[in-house]
Image (cartoon, rainbow, N blue to C red):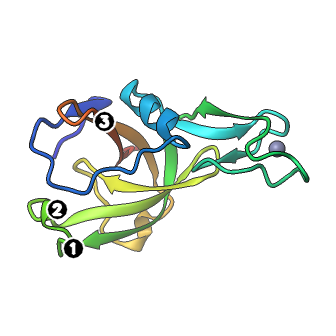
Amino acid sequence: MNVNPQSYTVDLDWKKPYPSIDHDNEAFWDGLKEHKLLVWKCQQCGAVYWPKAYCQNHENEPFAANCEWTEASGRGKIFAFNIHHWAFHPGFKEEVPYVYALIELEEGPLISSQLVGDDLPTDIHKIGQTVEIVYEDHPAQGFTLPKFRVVRG
Ligand SMILES: [Zn+2]
């Protein structure tokens, strides 16, 4: 799949598990729909988390005190990846083999997602390679998924 624009639309019946969207993460999912990757940032010390968490640098604070969703750069590096040759859920049957990766965001947190595009990693020499977010819009289902692609050069 050649993924050049910063987003693309998938207009198909949804056959996979739905993302689990709740009160604590709905701002993150709303951000994706606006093509923004949000991370959870402590306004007091600048520590960044994903998913939403309490800041580990302060004691005796209420949960999530001084923290806000903040837009991230959308760039990071491949921390680890594996190639799925078998669909563990029938909804993924037409996509195997696909690459599932842990991305270390520039801001620090790890996020897991599928890598898309032409330049997919096949061996461990691709660990550390720079990736950037691509927004996969699913208008019929009302959500956007964060996918990542390798940045060339
Ligand atoms: Zn803090």
**Residue 74 marker:** none
Please say if the residues under marks 1 and 3 sit with CB atoms less than 8 Å apart: no
Quarter occupied by residue 3: top left
Mark closer to the chain start, 1 or 3? 1
Please say if 124 is above or below 73.
Answer: below
Quarter occupied by residue 110: bottom right
Mark 2: few/some/many CA within 10 Å (<14, 14-19, 20+): some
Is residue 28 left or right of 108 when viewed as pictured? left
Kindly identify which residue carries mark 3: 143
Is residue 67 left or right of 27 when viewed as pictured? right
Expressed as whole percent of the image width and height from the top left, the position of residue 28 reads 49, 37
Expressed as whole percent of the image width and height from the top left, the position of residue 96 reads 15, 66
SS under mark 3 = strand
Kindly identify which residue carries mark 1: 88
Q: Nearer the viewer, mark 2 or mark 3?
A: 3
* Observer able to see residue 49: yes
Mark 3: few/some/many CA within 10 Å (<14, 14-19, 20+): some
Expressed as whole percent of the image width and height from the top left, the position of residue 122 reads 30, 68
Kindly identify which residue carries mark 2: 92
Under mark 3, the amino acid is Phe
Q: CA distance from mark 2 to mark 1?
A: 7 Å
Under mark 1, the amino acid is Phe
SS under mark 1 = loop
Mark 1: few/some/many CA within 10 Å (<14, 14-19, 20+): few
Please say if the residues under marks 2 and 1 sit with CB atoms less than 8 Å apart: yes
